[in-house]
Image (spheres, grey):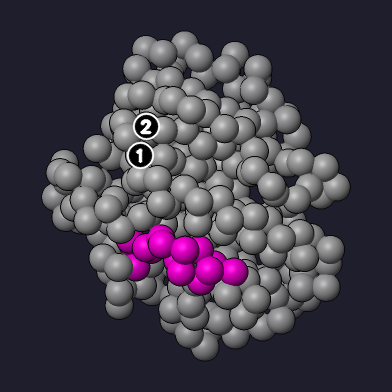
């Protein structure tokens, strides 16, 4: 069973790239974030292509920003749109959707960005993560669970090409990392880092300043699973090929293979980067000199 997560950064703009990737990677379940479409618009755009490939769809979006989806070639049951008990900004935003796919409870998540540490959006982010922790604590006791998506948090300094470039910015603060730690304490495992504990692994590269070819990236797209799912992992890796070329998202998909690994135990980034972002190098990165993330939603 192949399960993937990808912040597509506008499903409409990436329509051809998404369909090409589905045909190449052949995932059984896909979690998408930042579709930026309403439910009706997503189905109108993708219904025929996904139907021909055997995918059922659960989408949650309002057509402006955000938007999340789950595509499944197997079952797609007990769909929940929205994060139960989650805060709004000011009202509810389409940042979470869940479904049970072949016995696994799967959440596709787009965690709020936070913007800057003194912005009300940062407090919203922490409150949203607290609500997610409560959901995880309840659901992890009921059976296999996966929470996948763009968490907008780099778990450790090792997940940032140059932590100095993020000084004073969101995504690396102790408060955000503590909130993420509460999710793992509730019973989740970061299966990519568990499989590749010492490797340089990124999932996002800014469009600016040649960050992708230089490998100036961060790892913010996470695959957190319950222990019973983690025990089934045979491969977990970042599909860098989907980030290459023109018209692509600034994120790459993260793929988890359960029970069998069709492409063998590959990783951590495929194909491996030619450039190696290293600490202490100036320029690039996701943060600007103002300490503000360029992705403000």
Seen at 50% across and 56% down, the residue is 137
In this rendered view, identify the residue nearer to me: 205 or 255: 255
Seen at 60% across and 42% down, the residue is 96
Q: Is residue 180 magenta?
A: yes
Q: Which quarter of the rendered picture does the N terminus lie within?
A: top left
Q: Quadrant of residue 84?
A: top right
Q: What residue is disc 2 on?
A: 101
Whether 100 is drawn above or below 113: the answer is above
Gap in angstroms between the C-alphas marked 2 and 1 = 5 Å
Q: Is residue 10 visible?
A: no
Q: Position of residue 285 (x, y in %)?
A: 58, 70
Q: Position of residue 164 (x, y in %)?
A: 60, 85
In this rendered view, identify the residue nearer to me: 127 or 52: 127
Q: Quadrant of residue 262?
A: top left
Give the left or right position of residue 72, taking residue 196 as reference: right
In this rendered view, identify the residue nearer to me: 152 or 160: 152
Q: Is residue 143 magenta?
A: no
Whether 293 is drawn above or below 157: the answer is above
Q: Mark 2–mark 1 contact, CB under 8 Å?
A: yes
- Secondary structure of the residue carrying tag 1 is strand
Q: Position of residue 149 (x, y in %)?
A: 50, 49
Q: Residues within 10 Å of mark 2 (few under 14, many from 20)?
A: many
Give the left or right position of residue 17, taking residue 269 as reference: right
Q: Is residue 30 visible?
A: yes
Q: Position of residue 97 (x, y in %)?
A: 56, 37
Q: What residue is disc 1 on?
A: 104
- Secondary structure of the residue carrying tag 2 is strand
For the record, the magenta segment spans 179-193
Whether 161 is drawn above or below 48: the answer is below
């Amino acid at each position: 069973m192949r399960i993937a997560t990808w912040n597509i950064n506008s499903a409409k703009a990436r329509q051809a790239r998404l369909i090409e990737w589905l045909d190449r990677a052949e995932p059984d379940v896909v979690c998408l974030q930042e579709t930026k479409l309403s439910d009706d618009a997503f189905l109108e755009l993708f219904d025929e292509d996904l139907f021909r490939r055997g995918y059922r769809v659960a989408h949650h979006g309002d057509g402006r920003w955000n938007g999340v989806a789950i595509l499944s070639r197997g079952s797609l049951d007990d769909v929940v749109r929205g994060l139960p008990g989650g805060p709004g900004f000011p009202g509810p935003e389409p940042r979470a959707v869940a479904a049970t796919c072949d016995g696994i409870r799967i959440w596709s998540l787009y965690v709020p960005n936070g913007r800057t540490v003194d912005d009300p959006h940062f407090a919203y982010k922490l409150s949203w993560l607290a609500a997610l922790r409560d959901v995880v604590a309840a659901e992890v006791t009921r059976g296999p669970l996966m929470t996948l998506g763009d968490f907008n948090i780099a778990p450790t300094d090792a997940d940032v090409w140059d932590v100095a470039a993020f000084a004073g910015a969101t995504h690396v603060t102790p408060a955000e990392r503590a909130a993420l730690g509460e999710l793992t304490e509730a019973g989740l495992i970061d299966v990519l880092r568990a499989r590749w504990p010492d490797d340089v692994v990124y999932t996002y590269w800014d469009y600016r300043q040649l960050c992708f070819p230089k490998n100036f990236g961060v790892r913010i797209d996470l695959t957190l699973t319950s222990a019973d799912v983690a025990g089934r992992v045979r491969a977990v890796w970042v599909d860098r090929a989907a980030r290459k070329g023109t018209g692509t998202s600034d994120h790459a998909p993260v793929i988890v293979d359960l029970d069998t690994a069709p492409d063998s135990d590959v990783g951590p980034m495929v194909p491996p980067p030619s450039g190696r972002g290293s600490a202490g190098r100036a320029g690039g990165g996701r943060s600007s000199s103002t300490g503000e993330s360029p992705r403000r939603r």
